[in-house]
Amino acid sequence: MFTKQLIENAPNKHNLFENTKIDKIERTENGFVAITNFKERIYCKKIVIATGYNLDLIEQNLCMCDISYTIITNPLPELKIKNNALVQDDKEPYHYMRLLPDARIIFGGEDTASKGKNIDEKVAKKKYRKLYKDLCKMFPDFADKIRVEYSFCGYFGWTDDNLGLIGESKFKDIYYMISCGANGVINAFAGAKILLDLFSGKENPLIPLFSPTRET
């Protein structure tokens, strides 16, 4: 929904291209040419790589990826959590939980290291069963009422200091906007201001904190 609103309110909608992948970036005398999966060429002076956890275009080992697993239950209106607080334990692997507006529980965690681009469905199903069992143990009075109605998993990126990679890379005029860590949306808002200030030549105390070339 957030991305949809960004697109709908963008001032240059005619420059948005759906289902277009950048396969290759080449440096030219005047900047860069980005070559798409349709063999079209896009010429520009600066490159901003904001590809989520698709890390093909950034340097290796800057961001590591895990796979996180999540289940969503049936509505349980009788189950109450004070102030509808987000709950997270300190186990390894961790678990987090919160109540959704329709009284469902979203319960996730059980992260595993990513060993490639494909998610192992057998491992995922095993993790969903583990999450269900752990949730029932947390609420034994509701164990006979809890059902898993939705389950999903996805990549979760992190850095050694759990901050995003935002700013100019070690390659001149190539910038990263990768919101690693548990505060991705917050990092994204901060990153927009950081990049704007970098392009405008303004000082910003967050620039060294998120710099892709920082020491961690």
Image (spheres, rainbow, N blue to C red):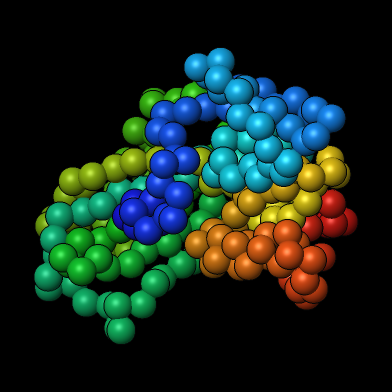
Residue depicted at 63% across the width and 35% down the height: 55
Q: Quadrant of the C terminus?
A: bottom right
Relative side of 30 to 137, left or right? right
Q: Position of residue 203 (x, y in %)?
A: 80, 73
Residue closest to the eye, 18 or 32: 32
The answer to whether residue 172 is above or below residue 23 is: below
Q: Position of residue 58 (x, y in %)?
A: 71, 36
Q: Position of residue 186 (x, y in %)?
A: 54, 67
Relative side of 129 to 187, left or right? left
Q: Position of residue 111 (x, y in %)?
A: 51, 45
Residue 142 seen in render: no
Residue depicted at 79% across the width and 29% down the height: 27
Residue closest to the eye, 98 or 50: 50
Residue at the limit of the structure toward the top, as seen here = 39
Residue depicted at 41% across the width and 41% down the height: 14
The answer to whether residue 48 is above or below residue 23 is: below
Relative side of 134 to 90, left or right? left
Residue 18 seen in render: yes
Quarter-wise, where is residue 1 in the image? Answer: bottom left
The answer to whether residue 190 is above or below residue 107 is: below
Relative side of 42 to 38, left or right? right
Residue at the limit of the structure toward the bottom, as seen here = 83
Q: How many marks?
A: 0
Residue depicted at 59% across the width and 45% down the height: 50
